[in-house]
Image: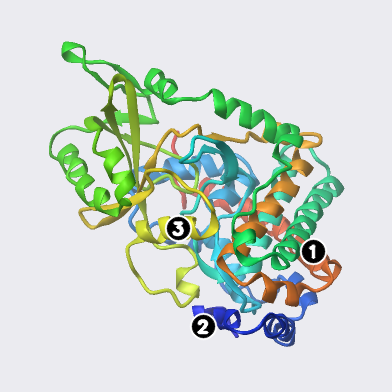
Amino acid sequence: MSATTATRDDLKSTAGTREERLRHGRDRRKHLSRSKLGVLGLKKRDFDPIAVLLAATEGRVPALLPTKYKRMSASPFAFFRGAVSIMAADLAREPHTGLIVQLCGDAHVQNMGCFETPDGRVVFDINDFDETIAGPWEWDVKRMATSIVLAGSESDHNRSGCAAAAETFVRAYCENLEALADQPVLVAARHQIHRLKKAQTISAALRQAQRANPADLTRKYTENGARGQIRFKKVDGILWRIVGRHRQEILESLPLFRESLPSERLHLFDFFRPLDVAFKVVGTGSVGLRDYVVLMEGNGRGDPLFLQIKQEVASAYARYLSHRPGHQGLRVADGQRKIQPISDLLLGWTRIGEHDFLVRQLNDHKVSLDLEQLKGRGLDDLAAIAGELLARGHARSGDPVAIKGYIGNCAKALGSILKYAEAYADLTRADFERFQKAIKDGRIKVAS
């Protein structure tokens, strides 16, 4: 089976008995042996990675692309974060297992962080789903493992330390996937990660997130306007107010967002009224996409809501998978709900003009990890948790029994994926040099 023929029909294994599903997974080794999971196949690479990167700009604001490329130029890992289109093309060149899950899509260490759940708890989990799509489980695992190698290099780990952390991640994925496959289906779907507070890096992030609140954003992004009404202020290169017809178009998208909410959440949203609108530049891979923030007020000035309306375009993997075009905001919200047992209280979608948008809270105690926090034991601790989180997401959205059948004894799959991750990290470093040369030659323009 090639990457272009993978469909949800591959999930038909879930219709059989447990023994049939295990056998289905083992049978997939005939198509792709576990040793071949480690094959990168550079001789088959028949595309220019920089051309692929430059082509992945459909729907973005051209004036912001130099800012995206500037952020990507900081390091090989920063480049990797913004170049998911290149890795998607590389993954699609090789055969895959045909065991389909809901991919996170852009699985890397800085797409995990803290956020607040609808019941008020602060959790640590995957927190970016822009690239989510149904695809083969190993694509997520390979991308996350590669990110651990690259992030480890950037946080002062040597090559063996990076490889050890990537091994920790893959082993945690295999062991937790197997454990979830052996649990009752609904128990596995509700699985909670219990080791978070034991990991010093994650525990520190959770404490920071618990201290965060909407008042922090009020101080950071707002000021008193005419007649004392609160409004957004300009933050150079990051945030600026939107006025006039453009502002009205954004506010007119809120009724459609309202329709996307479950009735009990719709009731809560109706207590808020909009005060102001701004444009915000976010992330690395997301730079160039339209990202609006609506400042709203509930029970007075002490009850602000920052509603993020983020443009979504087709997943970088869509062209390589049997994916029917649809509302891209709905794709992201639906994918997040399949992967996670809990999500943003106000997660929904809308449309503005010809573009699709995901809607969520900008501030729900969100905190992301800094690479400085990965020094020492931090990288290995994060790798173990990443493996458990990804295993849970795949168990919820795919067939963990079939994947367990394919993996079997973890050692062979682990060795192959580790081999792939180290090779792809080296390839990313080479692509980063090509990227820097393209900047020097004027092929790519970066912000000053």
Residue at 36%, 56% (x, y): give it: 329
Residue at 56%, 42% (x, y): give it: 73
Location of residue 89 with respect to 260 vertically, above or below? below
Q: Tell me whether the residue at label 2 lies in contact with that at label 1, contact meaning CB atoms closer than 8 angstroms.
A: no
Indicate the position of residue 195 as horizontal and vertical percent values. Answer: 74, 42
Quick one: 52 or 338, which is closer to the camera? 338
Q: In which quarter of the image is the C terminus?
A: top left
Going by the numbered disc 2, the residue's amino acid type is Asp
Q: Can you identify the residue that label 3 sits on? A: 54
Location of residue 116 with respect to 28 vertically, above or below? above
Going by the numbered disc 3, the residue's amino acid type is Leu
Q: Which quadrant of the structure image shows residue 401?
A: bottom right
Quick one: 347 or 279, which is closer to the camera? 347
Find numbered disc 2 in the image and state the secondary structure of the residue it sits on.
helix
Task: Say whether disc 2 or disc 1 marks the residue closer to the N-terminus.
Answer: 2
Left or right: 416 as drawn, with respect to 260:
right
Going by the numbered disc 1, the residue's amino acid type is Lys
Find numbered disc 1 in the image and state the secondary structure of the residue it sits on.
helix
Q: Which quadrant of the structure image shows residue 99?
A: bottom right
Q: Is residue 262 visible?
A: yes
Q: Can you identify the residue that label 2 sits on? A: 9
Indicate the position of residue 175 as horizontal and vertical percent values. Answer: 78, 60
Find numbered disc 3 in the image and state the secondary structure of the residue it sits on.
helix
**Dot in front, 2 or 3:** 2
Q: Can you identify the residue that label 1 sits on? A: 419
Task: Say whether disc 1 or disc 3 marks the residue closer to the N-terminus.
Answer: 3
Q: Categorize mark 3 by other alpha carbons within 10 Å: few (<14), some (14-19), many (20+).
A: some
Q: Tell me whether the residue at label 2 lies in contact with that at label 3, contact meaning CB atoms closer than 8 angstroms.
A: no
**Dot in front, 2 or 1:** 2
